[in-house]
Image (spheres, rainbow, N blue to C red):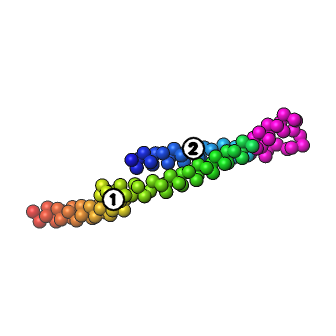
């Protein structure tokens, strides 16, 4: 379940990043022209680009808010589900890995001492 949620968030992040890039490209193209030298159709095109930039910025804002809400809404149920199934947290797993590493080093050291005495 959490894998699905992580993938959904990653997809949303990718879409959000792509939308931001499109907005920036539109903004650059709209501001790069000089208004006095434009023909009527170019002015209309610039107006369309400016409105598109505004709309895309709003979409990006909604996506960012939506991602935050999804993370907030899912955090509580996922934590309760993890507790119900008695799953270890990342910190607990990291601590256990460190304890295993230290124990393995001690075992290796004891084996070397036994081998040298034989």
Q: Residue furthest right?
A: 36
Out of 83 and 11, give the one closest to the viewer. Answer: 83
Q: What label does residue 1 carry, if any?
A: none
Which x, y percent locates residue 101? 28, 61
Which x, y percent locates residue 12? 54, 46
Which x, y percent locates residue 42? 83, 36
Q: Which residue is mark 2?
A: 15
Q: Is residue 44 magenta?
A: yes
Of labels 1 and 2, the one closer to you = 1
Position of the C terminus by quadrant: bottom left
Q: Is residue 22 magenta?
A: no
Q: Which residues are magenta?
A: 28-50
116 on left or right of 19? left
Residue 117, relative to residue 29: is it above or below?
A: below
9 on left or right of 84? right
Q: Which residue is mark 1?
A: 83
Quadrant hosting residue 39: top right
Which x, y percent locates residue 67? 54, 51
Circle 2: element type: helix
Residue 101, relative to residue 6: is it above or below?
A: below
> Can residue 107 be seen by looking at this rendering?
yes
Q: Say few, some or many: other residues with alpha carbon within 10 Å of mark 2 (under 14 / 14 to 19 / 20 or more).
A: some
Magenta stretch, main secondary structure class: helix
Q: CA distance from mark 1 to mark 2?
A: 32 Å
The mark nearer the N terminus, 1 or 2, is 2
Circle 1: element type: helix
* Residue at position x 44%, y 48% in the image: 5
Q: Residue furthest top?
A: 41
* Residue at position x 53%, y 54% in the image: 69
> Can residue 94 be seen by looking at this rendering?
no
Quadrant hosting residue 51: top right
């Amino acid at each position: 379940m959490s894998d699905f949620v992580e993938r959904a968030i990653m997809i949303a992040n990718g879409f959000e990043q792509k939308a931001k890039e499109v907005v920036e490209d539109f903004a650059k193209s709209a501001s790069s022209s000089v208004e006095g030298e434009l023909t009527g159709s170019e002015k209309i095109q610039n107006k369309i680009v400016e409105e598109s930039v505004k709309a895309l910025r709003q979409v990006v804002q909604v996506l960012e808010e939506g991602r935050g809400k999804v993370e907030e809404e899912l955090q509580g149920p996922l934590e309760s589900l993890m507790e119900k199934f008695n799953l270890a947290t990342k910190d607990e797993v990291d601590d256990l890995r460190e304890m295993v590493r230290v124990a393995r080093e001690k075992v290796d050291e004891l084996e070397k001492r036994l081998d040298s005495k034989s």
